Image (cartoon, rainbow, N blue to C red):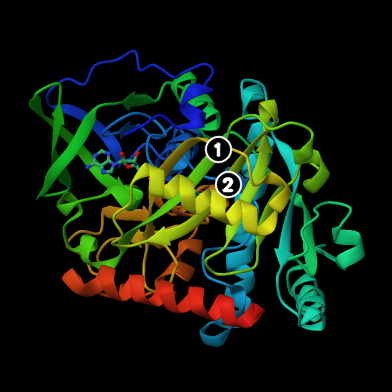
Amino acid sequence: MNNTWYDDTLINRFGPNEHLTNNYKCAVLIVGGGLAGLSLLYKLKKNNVDAVLIEENHIGSGASGRNGGFCLSGWAQDYDVLLKYLSKEEVVTLEKIAASGVKWMKKKCLSKGYEHTNLQSGVLKCFLTNNIEKVKKHVIAQNKLFHQNEEFLNKENLNKYVCSDKYTCGVFRQDSFQFHPLNFMHALAKDCSKMGASIFENCKFVSYQMDGAKINSSVFNENEMVNIQSEKIVFATGGYGGKEIKDLKSYWLPIKTFIGVTKPIGNELQSVLKKPLGFSDNRRAGNYYRVLPENRLSWGRGISAVGKFTYSNLKRAISKEINYFFPELRNVEIDYVWSGNMAYASHYMPYVGSTKIGNEEKNVFTLMGFGGHGMNTAPGSAMVLADFILGKNNKYEVFNRFRRKWNGGLIGPYIAEMKYKYLQMKDYFDVA
Ligand SMILES: Cc1cc2nc3c(=O)[nH]c(=O)nc-3n(C[C@H](O)[C@H](O)[C@H](O)COP(=O)(O)OP(=O)(O)OC[C@H]3O[C@@H](n4cnc5c(N)ncnc54)[C@H](O)[C@@H]3O)c2cc1C
């Protein structure tokens, strides 16, 4: 796997100072060192739970350390869709969880030890539609329902932030922000470690067996199999989990998405992106981009469930997209390009809670499926699951509304790919 721009600008790497020993015992074993697992570890440790985290590679080596770096409220699924099958109260509860994730992340980014997360406030969603009135009405309705203050921008006001003749209007979210996600992950791991949490890297969870009230897990570490005994397990394996998560593997799909970072660009970047915000567009298969230090442009785009890709193809696809929106930048070269896995259930919502409904494995939990919107929803959901594990409340029950749905087995990825192509086509005709 090639280096990401985040790898090359990582400051203050977290380094575990402990080795995993055989027959290790703990109360809660968390599998996966992404934002979901790490924020859960943080909350449990804060409440004096003997929780331990293992990670197959390094902290943040999954999606959490290689994403677009946007943190904004909401979920991978749109509220308009959720409102079709959930009650208003349930949707408001979900938004509260999503917003609490943004708040928690922002507070952390601004605290001591997190300076290198480089928080920049403000995310602007740009629309390609001709139905501007519909966007305006939608903003008013969302603000009323969720007590938010999203700001509608007409074309003239939008041009003060971004200049592309493809966009017709925009929605500005001041409370949202962008940041360096890998530096965040390492700062959070250090924070957990300072509270006495054990974090083991290069430890692959292989299997588990129930033994009365205890769970015995086999973990592969430094060329040998080690046993960990715990009372509970939480799988926070994102889009990287395999057969070790048993049946759960059949209820989501790993979907890839891609990011390119350009070489440093001169002043022409500020002539099109006038403010240092995070920008995205309204298409389901849209772009998300922002300015990085040295005047580089980070550009995220596309998803694929099956597609094979080469780095040169990816660079070409990203350049083409930049050129479509900003012809002024057509000669800009792409320096870095990478992909990452996201876990998607067919309803686009996460699985949070017991992996099985019933008693037999009630102490085996899942915290995964955040899709392309995990930087707020993963920590928001982790806090809710932690409260349940701590016996504080049952708020997590709202997630039982998202039943596990089979992923379609071997043909599942092809169905997902077709769905994506359909959405791309729809995006195209909506604009044309
Ligand atoms: C390119 C890209 C851009 C994105 N952009 C954004 C964005 O701008 N904003 C946003 O909100 N979201 C974004 N997302 C989505 C977001 O990154 C994810 O939703 C979020 O990081 C999921 O966190 P996680 O902890 O569930 O999974 P991950 O971060 O993937 O962590 C899972 C971890 O589990 C480990 N693991 C798996 N199996 C095992 C095992 N058997 N034993 C031990 N460890 C194991 C993996 O190695 C991995 O480190 C993006 C995703 C990608 C890929």
Q: Give above or below for 299 relative to 203.
A: below
Image x and y of residue 257, in percent? 43, 53
Q: Give above or below for 185 relative to 321.
A: above
Image x and y of residue 406, in percent? 25, 74
Rendered residue at 60%/69% (across/down): 283
Distance from label 2 to label 1 (Cα)? 6 Å
Q: Nearer the viewer, residue 125 or 14?
A: 125
Rendered residue at 71%/61% (across/down): 125
Q: Which residue is mark 2?
A: 299
Q: For disc 2, does the CB lie below 8 Å from ligand 1?
A: no
Rendered residue at 76%/83% (across/down): 131
Q: For disc 1, does the CB lie below 8 Å from ligand 1?
A: no
The C terminus, quarter of image: bottom right
Quarter of the image for residue 183 reads top right
Q: Secondary structure at mark 2?
A: strand
Query: Would you say the residues marked 2 and 1 are in contact, meaning their CB atoms lie under 8 Å apart?
Result: yes
Residue found at the far right of this picture: 156
Check residue 176 in the rendering and tell me which mark sits there, or answer none.
none
Quarter of the image for residue 25 reads top left
Q: Secondary structure at mark 1?
A: strand
Crowd rating for badge 2 (residues with CA inside 10 Å; few <14, some 14–19, many 20+) = many
Question: Is residue 133 rendered to the left or right of residue 297?
Answer: right
Mark 2: amino acid: Trp
Question: Is residue 320 rendered to the left or right of residue 362?
Answer: right
Residue found at the far front of this picture: 331
Mark 1: amino acid: Val
Q: Would residue 392 be seen by someone viewing this image from the given angle?
A: no
Residue found at the far bottom of this picture: 84
Q: Which residue is mark 1?
A: 261
Q: Give above or below for 389 relative to 43.
A: below
